[in-house]
Amino acid sequence: MRYWLFKSEPETYSIDHLAKDRTTFWNGVRNYQARNLLKEAQPGDGILFYHSSAEPPGVAGLAQVAEAAKPDPTQFDKKSEQYDPDSSKDDPRWWGVTIRFERKLPRFVGLPELKGMRALSAMVLLQRSRLSVQPVTDAEWRAIVEAGTR
DNA sequence: GCCAACGTTGGC
DNA sequence: GCCAACGTTGGC
């Protein structure tokens, strides 16, 4: 079982939206590296639900992978903003996973706090910009869940 | 609103 | 294959 961090702009889709929907298909990823990571995600994997472009940005809650990757239908939809004319149904380029709400963290863990945590000094979130799906280590997961539960 | 980071596109 | 131009992400 692995851990991931998914970024979402809360104005578009927040942890509260997920809490209400219970599950959602996480699609619209159009970055190859993020896509490759999505395809590795397996049911039961843990997800840190991160609010980006928010005030403040940070980890708002937990989710889990409910269903492994399937082709993202928006890539075939000419009317979609996410339409990709170069993708084919035989060999889809873009994929998404179904995720399930687990719980909101009692304490939102903001980015400034994350930056100050020693256990996270090598975390992808803090080292690499602009990657919307990221791997998270066991130790990072534990440190963040603990910080958000205290 | 600004801008750094960085991925993608396309001319050569 | 290089690299300049351009677009997007996302923190501040």
Image (tube, coloured by chain):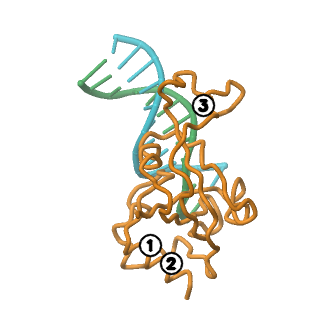
Chain colours: A orange, B cyan, C green
Q: Confirm or deny contact between disc 1 and disc 3 (CB under 8 A).
A: no
Q: Amino acid at mark 3?
A: Gln
Mark 1 — on which chain does it sit?
A: A
Q: Amino acid at mark 2?
A: Val
**Disc 2 secondary structure class:** helix
Q: Which residue is mark 3?
A: A75
Quick one: which residue is furthest to the bottom in this view? A150
Q: Which residue is mark 1?
A: A141
Q: Which residue is mark 2?
A: A145
Mark 3 — on which chain does it sit?
A: A
Q: Position of residue A123 (x, y in %)?
A: 38, 66
**Disc 1 secondary structure class:** helix
**Disc 3 secondary structure class:** helix
User: Between A141 and A21, which is closer to the camera in this rendering?
Assistant: A21
- The reply, left or right, for residue A91 in relation to residue A137 is right
Mark 2 — on which chain does it sit?
A: A
Q: Position of residue A1 (x, y in %)?
A: 41, 64
Q: Confirm or deny contact between disc 2 and disc 1 (CB under 8 A).
A: yes
